[in-house]
Amino acid sequence: MEEKKVAKIRLSTAILVFIIIVLIVALVITYYFGFVKKDENTETKQENLSNASNSISNDSKIAEENDNKQESNNTNTESQIILEGGFAFEAGDAYYEFDKQGNVSISGNVNEEKGTYKTIGTDEIEIHLTTEKTFNIETGESTTTSINKTEKIKVIDENTLLVDNYKLIRLEDNNNTSYTIDGTYECKEELENIAYVFKDGQVTLETLATTTGTYEIVGDKIKIHFNKTIDPTENTPKDISEDKELKILDSNTLINEEYNTKYYKTK
């Protein structure tokens, strides 16, 4: 009988094959974790980074929009207070005048301060005064100086302001009010007694001399034309031609804006 042939594998060959298989598996694992997995992680990181960037960008836009809204709200709040016209204390000589452009002037007995105002709250404004004009009653001259003063005013309503717990009341609307001036208006600040007496279109200015003439009211202005004066020393009338103008602050208060002198009704 013939002897069967049996394939025999040497031990060294088997070990070599096993090593080759192990190397192949190691290479596959290395490739997977070294390249494929790395690419996946990189893509994930890039995606996360992109999402984070988008999130930051969105948050930034939202914050910017909120800031813009807040700024807009603040602007709207500030733009709510616009004053125009004259205000005076119930008892006192100071006279405040505002305009829509944010300017303000404060007239006192012998001085006038000018500046600007701005809103600092829903019902509060701040005045910043930068110049002061002072009048010399004796000489009729004036001097202007720079100042730096601030004052806060509470706005109660469109006709009432509050300064240090003292009320400023809106004066009569000179544009819509028809005035009738009749009576005696005296200046309390002058060293000598000065008084205007108005009656039936005639006016008398009583100082050391007595000067007479006529007047007419145009809006909130009294336009005066003097045509005669009596000198106290000679006591004889003299013909003159002199024009003056007074502004009506209210029915009881007149002002000579040239010298910032006020006249108050006494009779």
Image: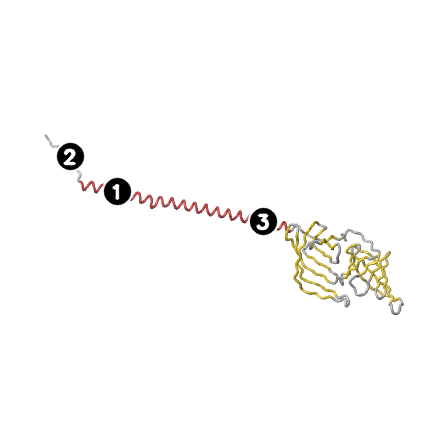
Distance from Cα at disc 1 to Cα at disc 2: 28 Å
Taking the spot 11% from the left edge, 32% from the top edge, the residue there is 3
Q: Secondary structure at mark 2?
A: loop
111 relative position to 215: left or right: left
Residue pointed to by mark 2: 6
Would you place residue 168 above or below residue 41 in this image? below
* Colouring rule applied to residues: secondary structure
Residue most toward the bottom?
233
Residue extending furthest front?
165
> What's the mark number on residue 70?
3
Most distant residue in the right direction: 236
Query: Would you name the residue on which mark 1 appears?
Result: 22
Q: Which of 266 and 180 lies nearest the eye of the viewer?
A: 266
Asked if the residue at tag 2 contacts the one at tag 3, i.e. Cβ–Cβ closer than 8 Å, the answer is: no
Task: Tell me residue 239's x, y (percent).
Answer: 87, 66
- Nearer to me, 195 or 68: 195
**Circle number at residue 125:** none
Separation (CA) of disc 3 from disc 2:
94 Å
Q: Secondary structure at mark 1?
A: helix
What's the CA distance linking mark 1 and mark 3?
69 Å
Kind of residue sitting beneath label 1: Val
- Tell me which label, 3 or 2, sits earlier in the chain: 2
C-beta proximity under 8 Å, tags 1 and 2: no
Kind of residue sitting beneath label 3: Gln
Three-letter amino acid code of the residue under disc 2? Val
Question: What percent of the width, then of the height, locates residue 152?
Answer: 66, 55
The answer to whether 196 appears left or right of 160 in the picture is right
Query: Residue at the left extreme?
Result: 1
